[in-house]
Amino acid sequence: MIKLYNYELSGDCYKVRLIMDALRIQFERIDLDFYPGYEHESPWFLRLNPLGQLPVIDDDGFILRDAQAILVYLASKYDPSGLWYPRSEAEALGRISMWLGFAESLGATAAAARLHDAMFHDADIEKCRADAHALFRVLDEHLWFAEQEGHEWLSSREHPTIADIACFPDVMLSEEGGISRLPYPAIRRWTDRMKRIPHFTLMPGIFGAWPARASQSA
Amino acid sequence: MARTPGNIIARWFPVARSEEVISRHVVQTQLLGQEIAVWRDDAGSVNAWENRCPHRGVRLSIGFNTGTELRCQYHGWRYATGNGQCTFIPAHPGQKPSSAIRANVYGSIEQYGFVWVHLGQQQTDTPALPTLTAQHAIALRSIFVEAPPSAVAEALLRGYRFSADPAHPQGSPGEILMSAASVVAHDAYILTATAATHDADASVTFLLQPMTESQTVIHGLLHVEGVGTERLTVLRHHNSQMTAFRDAVEGARRANSGKPVAVQYP
Amino acid sequence: MTTSAIESILWDDWHVVAELARLTRFRRFVTTLLGVCVTLELDPIGNVSARRDDGTIAAAEIKYGFVWICLGSSTRGIVEFAECLEPDRLLATAGSVRVAVSGLRAVENFLDLSHLAFVHAGYLGEEPHTEIKQYTVRPLAEGGIIATGCKVYQPKASPIATEGYDVDYIYAVLRPYIVVLYKANPVEMTRKDMIALFVQPVSEESCVAHAFTCYLKHGIDPAAVRSFQQFIFGQDRPILENQVPKRLPLGVGTEIPVRADGSSAAYRRWLGDAGVRFGAISTG
């Protein structure tokens, strides 16, 4: 069974939990005392991940760090449909990777703001928030035009991909870092759609979505 | 510059494009400093309520639109579409909630592709909706600006550029020939920009939504004939122009204040 | 609000400002209490000092794994819990979380029963078991209120609970910003586990919620206790941060309670009667 080195309140760990629940993968959580125990900085964990960051997975001895890399691995290995990460389609992979990079930027801005506001982490909070808003403007515009073309997901596919999973947590938890989503109506609609994905799982700070009308397509 | 007559509260303002007030969703917006939750029921009727549950003050915009009610995320209290009456309190499931418990309902109406709201007394102060050209009108993507409505209006009057026919660019390949639009203010919140090429003309009516004293949403209503299959090109063009305009307005404010514009979103 | 204008019930009392563990790790920690910026330092032999921005010293003590300070002249000691002296108890701090809302709202949320089935669905409550039966609230002689006879059906009431059952809760508000919950231990049902929230009022519209647990030791793993408390509080935080206005309204009118809100209504009344203004809206 895959082991996930986890912290329940981590947005990056949530990305891995989301894909594993969506793909119905059984996994074992090994919970670290991230805050206030700083267990991710302890020697035993640094041997697993010298960067001292969560999440890390151990799939029968195959150890991988970095939430985005873990998403690529799990979707490549465990999704028989090939919908979450269509390995044979160059354009789709290019777009998805672009959004995985965007997710890294969200980590440095929106997620950093949340860690600062909730868990006393050091950050240039005004810069984090300003930079997050700049990213949200880009994301909102992209999603707005995607909707105009009949797309519901980030990489213009008919089905969500790991691009959506990678970007969702830091966007959805942004208000915990003082970044309101009021000016981003297209982002707010996208987050509702994310919550309606089959087997979507919650975490503290995230509420579910009321089911869509029966007559609407998923 | 035309002055706004009368009481600003008893005036209709657009707050969202109708097609964006979708089923089982709650739109969060703001008007004159007041947060509003806008939602559509399953029968298609629109509601605009004060974004605050009357129980313990939690924002209704984080709650559920069930299709017939808003359900508050805190204690599950439910409020009926239309009159905002509380219909169910889960802590006392056998009891009918007091009629004193209701969401604060604002007047709302849909016209020209937008949901309009006014914050005045519903029964006495229903204002007249502005008369705009409805034919061949497309609601453009709305742009949020970190600047007061007056600054936005002034900047529009000083100069706005767009192409009357972005689907058929004239000039060198890759270039869209733009005209300096002639901009006219009907009042402090409604301005029209008109541009023409030798075989097309178009006008955009800008409808300003005053979110707070320092934040504005620019809604746009484009009037142009025969857009058809070029709709997306046209939408992208205007989005690009309005975004560049927004960046210039915000940049000028930063330059004037000597520091980055603080994002003051609620 | 000038510092001299802050009411004595807050100014002359002890407030938690940090977990001792945080100070042990960082040696020096800057925080804000009632709008006053304070620098905490731990010396090599384990004594803590608290210095205000203006250079003056504030009284500082260590108790229950926390650093407590008093900005004024303390009229009584730090709150004490008899349970904490029992030998088979595990005392643990369970994390400190910043919340962008008045600490009075955080205390009221802790008292609240009718949100358990919604905000903590599957853990501390569950639909359709949403009904809150009548319970009793009365004042405490030393100030504050106590609510007894509260019953909630809980699917997973504690880290070691293996099935759902109706849990008896007792709540006590001991100070304006201190609230305690007593619930029957799942193994020794005649004795009570205790969870306290020591809320640090940073400003009128922000606070730090410091959680403290005093559980019977049977089968309790401190890491699991801490992680469960963080999980539960993580669910409350976005609700708290979405309350408008951020300060707690003490008057009648803008927020409408029902019978299930007995303890919160009594809490607001007591705050008003006791003259608490910091973090509150006194009229309307």
Image (cartoon, coloured by chain):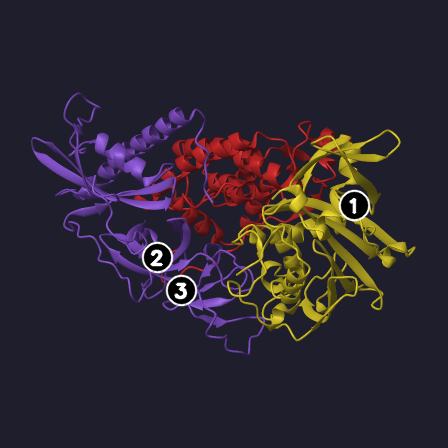
Which image quarter holds the N terminus of chain B? top left
Q: Amino acid at mark 2?
A: Leu
Name the quadrant containing residue A37.
top right
Q: Is residue A54 above or below residue A207?
A: above
Q: Which mark is residue B119?
A: 2
Chain the render paints yellow: C
In front of the other: C192 or C2:
C2
Q: Which mark is residue C73?
A: 1
Residue underneath mark 3: B67
Disc number lying in front (2 or 3): 2
Q: Is residue C55 above or below residue C170?
A: above
Determine whether label 1 and label 3 are within 8 Å by CB. no
Answer left or right for C47 relative to C127: right
Q: Give the drawing colour for chain B.
A: purple
- Who's the residue at 70% across and 55% down the image? C176
Among numbered discs 2 and 3, the one appearing first in the sequence: 3
Q: Are marks 1 and 3 on the same chain?
A: no
Residue A202 visible: no
Q: Which mark is residue C130?
A: none
Disc number lying in front (1 or 3): 1
- Who's the residue at 70% across and 67% down the image? C164
Q: Amino acid at mark 1?
A: Ser
- Who's the residue at 21% across and 24% down the image? B175
Q: Is residue C23 above or below residue A181?
A: above
Label 1, secondary structure: give it: loop
Q: Which chain is disc 1 placed on? A: C
Q: How far from the left and from the top, in percent, is residue B119? A: 34, 57
Q: Residues within 10 Å of mark 3 (few under 14, many from 20)?
A: many
- Who's the residue at 53% across and 38% down the image? A76
Q: Amino acid at mark 3?
A: Gly
Chain the render paints red: A
